[in-house]
Amino acid sequence: MIKIAPSILSADFSKLGEEVKRLDKGGADIVHIDVMDGHFVPNITIGPLVVKAIRPYTRLPFDVHLMMDNPMEFVDAYVEAGADSITVHAEVLPHLHRAIHYIKGLGVKAAVALNPSTPLNVLEYVLGDVDMVLLMTVNPGFGGQKFITAMMDKIRKLADMRSTYGADFCIQVDGGIGLHNIRDVVKAGAEVIVAGSAVFGAQDIKGIIEAMRQEAKL
Ligand SMILES: O=C(CO)[C@@H](O)[C@H](O)COP(=O)(O)O
Ligand SMILES: [Fe+2]
């Protein structure tokens, strides 16, 4: 069963609480929260206070994607604010193993994200430690970008690595995904589908989430 994780980066920021409620009513599985620091990526978004403010609007899990140079300085704050899973980028963490176990020690799930140009082999020795791997399928920083087609092969390779190593993490994909390509990414091995502009760009959130689930059925 795949999971649909709409990204609130494409929501109306003037009424985020209501937007999160709309996702809940629309049948989303997870709320994906993009945190950008203006350094790791050229954009600034959502601090822990905002996460705390929207937490009462839904019981859906909050998946916090930290696109930051120094994510470990903020992990505690996002967990206290109500995160259920925390994703950190391998590109900024020389002590990835320590970071994963620190996050798990806070009682939430730990995921590692890779930019499109980052090779999969940086994960080799932490595959048994992570709950989820997030493959960026666009360059992080903005919603509404085009899916990078070379990422299809990366998803397949990650799924192969998982079988080879007998690991059991989930494969999440993020960026440029919608009705037009959800089937292909799922066929390649993706299980958690992040979609921002595709979901919030639709008038009918329930309709688009249902259509995406249907389209993803292999
Ligand atoms: O992490 C990011 C962007 O850096 C994503 O989560 C985007 O928010 C996905 O948006 P779409 O490509 O689906 O519009
Ligand atoms: Fe994201």
Image: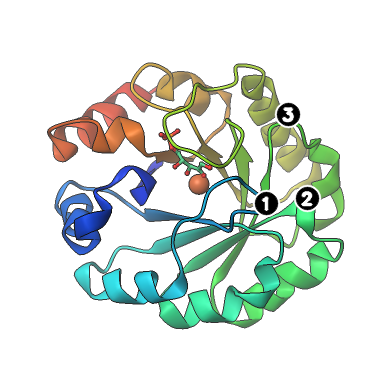
Please indicate, yes or no, whether residue 20 appears anywhere in the rendered image.
Answer: no
Quadrant including the N terminus: top left
The amino acid type found where label 2 is placed reads Glu
90 left or right of 38?
right
Disc 1 from disc 3: Cα separation:
26 Å
Q: Nearer the viewer, residue 152 or 218?
A: 152
Q: Secondary structure at mark 1?
A: loop
| Disc nearest the viewer among 2 and 3 | 2
Image depth: mark 1 or mark 2 in front: 1
Which badge, 2 or 3, is on the more N-terminal residue? 2
Q: Earlier in the sequence, mark 1 or mark 2?
A: 1
Q: Quadrant of residue 105?
A: bottom right
Left or right of residue 45, residue 127 in this image = right
Gap in angstroms between the C-alphas marked 2 and 3: 19 Å
Instruction: Specify the label residue 157 is tagged with.
Output: 3
Q: Amino acid at mark 3?
A: Lys
Please state which of residues 104 and 68 is positioned toward the viewer in this rendering. 68
Q: Residue at x 58, y 31 (%)?
A: 137
Relative image position of residue 157 (x, y in whole percent): 73, 29
- The circle on residue 40 is 1
Residue 33 higher or lower than 209, as above or below: below
On residue 91, which mark appears?
2
Dividing the picture into quadrants, the one containing residue 16 is: bottom left
Q: Residue at x 67, y 18 (%)?
A: 150
Residue at 76% in and 53% down: 90
Q: Amino acid at mark 1?
A: Phe
